[in-house]
Amino acid sequence: TVHHVDDFTTQALIDCQRRAILEPDHVLVVSRAWHDTLDRDYGVASQIVHNGVRPDRFPPISKDIRSQLRDSVGAKDRTVLLAVGGVEPRKGSRELFEAVGLLKAQGRRVVLVILGGHSFQDYEAYRLETLGLLPGLDLTLGQDILQLGTVDDLTLARWFRAADILTYPSVKEGFGLVALEALAADLPVVASSIPVFGEFLTDHVNALLPRVSDPAAIAHAIDEIILDPALRASLVAAGRTLVPEFTWDASAARHETLYADFR
């Protein structure tokens, strides 16, 4: 299964990834975008098997737990923006920070909570450079932007329920499972206009998809949800309709069918 093709700079990893795509007898991908990429760039035919989500991983939480999590980052009456995946280029972290800066300049009371960050690629230079932008954006690390690092599964699920908006302005994804996880937790999603998101998300129906790499567009989308409770409610309702279409049971059944055909 090819989840996505990485932009490696180490030749050994470039060669290994290429062999992993070219040598198998059968290749699966998680989205139409990568099906087309493998066909165009590698001449490899593939079958699509979407990712899935288990909604029972994200049950409702008590008011006390929600308050405890929000108090732990000093949220008080601020809007809690959640980002999952650490500070790295493909997550659009720089543009997200700039969007948060724009919102603060407009008088919006927001705090960005970032979960995750472990990667086998070295993004330290990008991370330091991006965090270095904060003073110029009138943002303070530990106050406006909080990095909580890797958390356990239960804490992750609770943050999906405790936050107000998932901010997921990626510039590249294999599928975008985090968006489905957020929708399973009734958390409205601000993603981006990359094609892979458009395979299962519809702008202003079950998510907002601002122009990719555009901080002003990202800030505007976040602001739309903050200012419009009816929009927020409609996004959550549409998410509840979408999630049952993308389950791990459905993914497993699709794998079983393909494996039988491959014999």
Image (tube, rainbow, N blue to C red):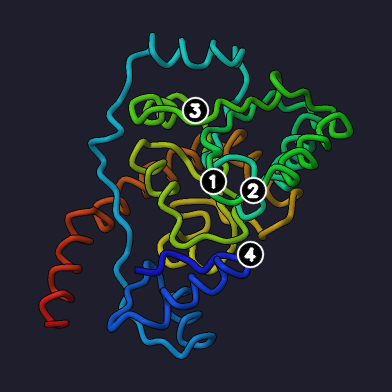
Per the image, the residue denoted by label 2 is: 122
Per the image, the residue denoted by label 3 is: 163
Q: Residue at x 41, y 87 (%)?
A: 44
Task: Give the secondary structure at mark 4.
Answer: loop
Which mark, by number, is residue 237?
none
Per the image, the residue denoted by label 4 is: 10
Q: Nearer the viewer, residue 159 or 117?
A: 117
Task: Give the secondary structure at mark 2.
Answer: loop
Task: Name which of mark 3 and mark 2 comes first in the sequence.
Answer: 2
Task: Give the secondary structure at mark 1.
Answer: loop
Q: Are marks 3 and 2 in contact (CB under 8 Å)?
A: no
As drawn, 204 above or below 261: above
Q: Residue at x 53, y 69 (%)?
A: 195
As drawn, 19 above or below 39: above
Q: Nearer the viewer, residue 118 or 19?
A: 19
Q: Position of residue 109 (x, y in %)?
A: 69, 23
* Label 3 crowd (10 A; few <14 / some 14-19 / many >=20): many
Amino acid of disc 1: Ser
Q: Quadrant of the C terminus?
A: bottom left
Amino acid of disc 4: Thr
Task: Give the secondary structure at mark 3.
Answer: loop
Separation of marks 1 and 3 at Cα, in angstroms: 24 Å
Q: Residue at x 32, y 80 (%)?
A: 24
Which mark, by number, is residue 119?
1
Q: How many marks?
A: 4
Q: Are marks 1 and 2 in contact (CB under 8 Å)?
A: yes
